[in-house]
Image (cartoon, grey):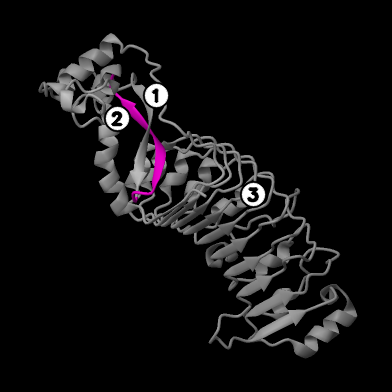
């Protein structure tokens, strides 16, 4: 419906009359050159959007064809240069030809801001949508998606992304390249892990991950400084403190690289081959504050709990430089406290400041 307080002209079409002469005459009597919003009643349309729609409603900004049974939108959509909101929920879109060719290159590709295709039959994110550079809100919930294309990063203006209720199993790291993304909904899928790169979504305020297959979260999630809501219910998150000490010993190259980094051995790019200079730039700091070491390819994966707001303990994945970083502290005063538990206490104060709302149940 219209936003309260706005008195924009509205038109409505019913009975599929857009495609019959009688319906055309009926609309001609009601249409207005100033109409900005058109809602088609949820009845089955026998074909795509009819030719002439842009002539009847040249100022159209909002088009709602939800529940009309559309299987394709048709080329007439491209003739609506002012359209900024397209709602096409609960239809039959998803097959070949569902979207008109040249969508991203048409004026509509620049004007469209809100697109809702939830409740359709898309098995993949349509490549044509990835050319809508001005898109701010994209909803593809309740479709048949099995993945998220890396090219989703092309939607640089995106603020809201809803992909809940699909069959998605993984999240591409490229999703982290959306600088304005504030709301990310990935609930009710089959996602098993979260890429640590998601911590680069500095504008993210809400992350919905409930009803997936997550057993841990990446430690980097603590870097989401503006996150206010994290929904995790319905995941097989680990319920006890678990350690995974699967560890491949470092190579000679890594041992040399660790020595250079930890002892601050000076070197210039001209001193080493280009590939080694690049290798040294990839060093990761061990998160154990009592260690000070670095690692490259060889590390210990460890799941530990971090206390959020003093109420929830979330399992976060850590990457340590060696098994010794997971050993109990030798100090008698800390004999009953593992190193990782001590780290958890340090991070708890950080997490409590950053995380406002965590939904686990």
Q: Residue at x 67, y 52 (%)?
A: 142
The span picked out in magenta is 309-322
The reply to whether the C-beta atoms of the residues labelled 3 and 2 are less than 8 Å apart is no
Please, is residue 96 above or below residue 71 in the view? above
Q: Which residue is mark 3?
A: 165
Q: Residue at x 56, y 38 (%)?
A: 191
Residue at the farthest top position:
252
The quarter of the picture where residue 101 lies is bottom right
Q: Is residue 317 left or right of residue 32?
A: left
Residue 282 seen anywhere in this rendered image of the structure: no
x, y percent for residue 168: 60, 41
Please, is residue 329 above or below residue 4 in the view? above
Mark 3 vs mark 1, CA separation in Å: 32 Å
Tag 1: Cα neighbours inside 10 Å, few (<14), some, or many (≥20)?
some
Q: Main secondary structure of the magenta part?
A: strand
Residue 243, numbered circle? 1
Residue 93 seen anywhere in this rendered image of the structure: yes
The reply to whether the C-beta atoms of the residues labelled 1 and 2 are less than 8 Å apart is yes
Report the label total.
Answer: 3
Residue situated in front as seen by the camera: 35 or 159: 159
Q: Which residue is mark 2?
A: 340
């Amino acid at each position: 419906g219209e936003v309260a307080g706005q008195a924009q002209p509205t038109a409505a079409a019913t009975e599929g009359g857009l495609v019959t002469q009688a319906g055309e005459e009926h609309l001609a009597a009601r249409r207005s050159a100033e109409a900005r919003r058109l809602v088609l009643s949820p009845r089955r349309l026998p074909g795509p959007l009819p030719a002439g729609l842009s002539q009847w409603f040249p100022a159209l900004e909002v088009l709602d064809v939800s529940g009309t049974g559309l299987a394709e939108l048709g080329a007439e959509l491209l003739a609506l240069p002012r359209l900024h909101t397209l709602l096409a929920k609960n239809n039959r879109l998803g097959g070949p030809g569902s979207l008109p060719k040249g969508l991203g290159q048409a004026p509509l590709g620049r004007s469209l801001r809100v697109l809702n295709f939830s409740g359709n039959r898309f098995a993949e994110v349509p490549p044509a949508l990835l050319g809508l550079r001005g898109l701010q809100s994209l909803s593809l919930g309740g479709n048949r998606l099995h993945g998220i294309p890396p090219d989703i990063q092309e939607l640089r203006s995106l603020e809201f992304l809803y992909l809940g209720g699909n069959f998605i199993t993984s999240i591409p790291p490229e999703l982290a390249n959306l600088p304005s993304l504030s709301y990310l909904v990935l609930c009710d899928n089959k996602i098993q892990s979260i890429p640590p790169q998601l911590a680069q979504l500095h504008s993210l305020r809400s992350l919905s991950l409930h009803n997936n297959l997550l057993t841990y979260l990446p430690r980097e999630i603590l870097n989401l400084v503006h996150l206010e809501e994290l929904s995790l219910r319905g995941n097989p998150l680990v319920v006890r403190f678990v350690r995974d000490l699967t560890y491949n010993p470092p190579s000679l190259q890594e041992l040399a690289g660790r020595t250079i980094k930890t002892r601050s051995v000076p070197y210039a790019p001209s001193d080493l081959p280009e590939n080694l200079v690049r290798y040294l730039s990839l060093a990761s700091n061990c998160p154990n504050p009592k260690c000070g070491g670095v690692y490259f390819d060889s590390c210990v994966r460890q799941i530990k709990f971090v206390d959020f707001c003093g109420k929830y303990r979330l399992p976060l994945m850590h990457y340590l430089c060696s098994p010794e970083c997971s050993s109990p502290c030798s100090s008698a005063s800390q004999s009953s406290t593992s190193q990782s538990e001590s780290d958890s206490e340090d991070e708890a104060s950080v997490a409590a400041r950053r995380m406002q709302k965590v939904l686990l149940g």
